[in-house]
């Protein structure tokens, strides 16, 4: 039992030391949710129209309410291979804590903007227009 406690204590000290070394190099900043999208052939105009009509108002309202700090839509202008992604949607949150309960808050905004049925219909239409390649979180850091 004493040996297990010693191992756990050593692990905690090592984990703290690794984080302390990393913190020496940067200051933690906000968190981005990055979604990488491959738009299907001949659907770019429809997809961008869909983003403009439904996603932009949603994010604008979330930004007004302080749920989102900012958002960006970026288009890839170079291509290395035919299966490359085309669009990135990036949403900026103050920190990881801002993600707690976010889904319910965004659902409430969506409800005001046309309801869940409209959101489901939009999602179904987008399935025909695009494929999500990946979605991940990244933390912005400022180097010291």
Image (tube, rainbow, N blue to C red):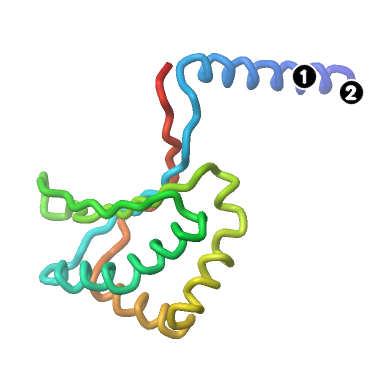
Residue drawn at (34%, 73%), measured in percent from left and top?
54
Q: Is residue 27 left or right of residue 16?
A: left
**Is residue 136 visible in the rendered structure shown here?**
no
Q: Please tell me in which quadrant of the rendered image residue 119 appears.
A: bottom left
105 or 6: nearer the viewer = 105
**Is 61 displayed left or right of 82 in the figure?**
right
Residue 15: image location, x then y, percent: 63, 21
Q: Which residue is mark 1?
A: 9
Q: Is residue 63 above or below residue 139?
A: below
Pointer 2 residue: 1
Residue at left offset 69%, top offset 20%? 11
Identity of the residue drawn at 30% across and 79% down? 125
Q: Position of residue 19 (x, y in %)?
A: 58, 21
Figure disc tally: 2
The reply to whether residue 34 is visible in this rendering is yes
Q: Position of residue 138 (x, y in %)?
A: 43, 40
Which residue shows up at 18% across the image and 74% down it?
46
């Amino acid at each position: 039992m004493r040996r297990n406690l010693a191992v756990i204590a050593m692990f905690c000290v090592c984990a703290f030391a690794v984080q302390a070394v990393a913190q020496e190099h940067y200051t933690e900043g906000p968190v981005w949710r990055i979604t990488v999208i491959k738009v299907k052939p001949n659907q770019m105009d429809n997809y961008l129209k869909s983003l403009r009509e439904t996603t932009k108002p949603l994010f604008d309202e979330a930004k007004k309410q302080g749920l989102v700090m900012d958002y960006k839509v970026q288009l890839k202008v170079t291509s290395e291979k035919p299966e490359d992604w085309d669009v990135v949607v990036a949403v900026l949150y103050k920190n990881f804590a801002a993600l707690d309960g976010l889904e319910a808050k965004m659902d409430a905004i969506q409800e005001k903007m046309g309801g869940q049925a409209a959101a489901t219909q939009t999602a179904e239409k987008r399935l025909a227009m695009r494929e999500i390649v990946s979605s991940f979180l990244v933390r912005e850091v400022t180097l010291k």
